[in-house]
Image (tube, rainbow, N blue to C red):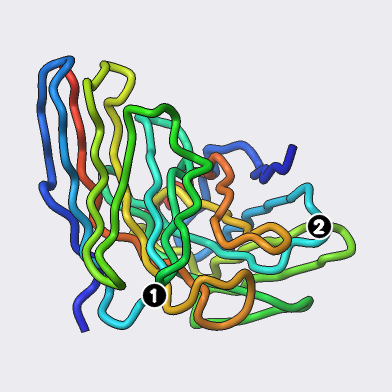
Amino acid sequence: GAGVSQSPSNKVTEKGKDVELRCDPISGHTALYWYRQRLGQGLEFLIYFQGNSAPDKSGLPSDRFSAERTGESVSTLTIQRTQQEDSAVYLCASSLIGLAGGRGSEQFFGPGTRLTVL
Amino acid sequence: QKEVEQNSGPLSVPEGAIASLNCTYSDRGSQSFFWYRQYSGKSPELIMFIYSNGDKEDGRFTAQLNKASQYVSLLIRDSQPSDSATYLCAVSFSNDYKLSFGAGTTVTVRA
């Protein structure tokens, strides 16, 4: 079936504005992850959703960041009062299951949203 | 602090040669190991995963895992110019589902 999709592909905003990024996981995947990749740097974990369990928000860099997921489908990542250091590519991934190790835990990434904060 | 380290690049190999990429990780209890390929300006693409000690082959790619040495490697045989990309090692630490990524190794295959 279709892969992970994200929208918008690019977002340019002014400092202080709020932005909302969207992720549609692979159909049937119960686990969904958000990562951030700053220019020339590695991927940083932000947040994880698994079914109806409470999300793991341990990677969110500040309280300006929040995310929601509707059931086992769409997720939105919201950044309030954006700052220039928020400029990065925001990547969403999904996996069939959310357990550590073993088949089904492979994460597949979407194309990302490139956020530029002026 | 749990870490994933990759050999520093860039790595330049001639077309047809073997490219060898190395990755070490700090948590002995780590369970899942992944290699992603990332072309410039694109998102990571999963190319290999390995969960048990030994070798796993898929086409021109071979992943090797040695949990005792906390080491995972990726071999690319018969390297092609289209293999030129950054290769990311990712590890799922003990009882954890999120991935920790290495900084990546950039590979350039010379035609």
Viewer-side residue, A89 vs B21: A89
Query: Looking at the rendering, which quadrant does residue A94 occupy?
Result: bottom left
* Residue B5 image offset from top left, x and y in percent: 67, 42
Residue B103: image location, x then y, percent: 55, 39
Q: Which residue is mark 2?
A: B70
| Three-letter code for the amino acid on which mark 1 is drawn | Thr
Extreme residue toward the right, this view: B68
Residue at the image point whose x is 15% and y is 34% from the top: A19
Give yes or no for contact between labels 1 and 2 (Cβ–Cβ under 8 Å): no
Q: Secondary structure at mark 2?
A: loop
| Image: A42 above or below B82 | above
Position in image of residue B41 (x %, y %) = 26, 43
Nearer to the camera, B51 or A22: A22
User: Looking at the picture, do discs 1 and 2 lie on one chain?
Assistant: no
Of residues B72 and A79, the one nearer the viewer is A79
The C terminus of chain B lies in quadrant: bottom left
The residue located at (47%, 66%) in the rendering is A53
For disc 1, the marked residue is: A30
- The answer to whether residue A53 is left or right of residue A88 is right
The chain ID associated with circle 2 is B
How busy is the neighbourhood of tag 2: few (under 14 within 10 Å), some, or many (20 plus)?
some
Q: Quadrant of the N terminus of chain B?
A: top right
Q: Choose between A13 and B60: the one closer to the eye.
A: A13
What is the chain identity of the residue bearing mark 1? A
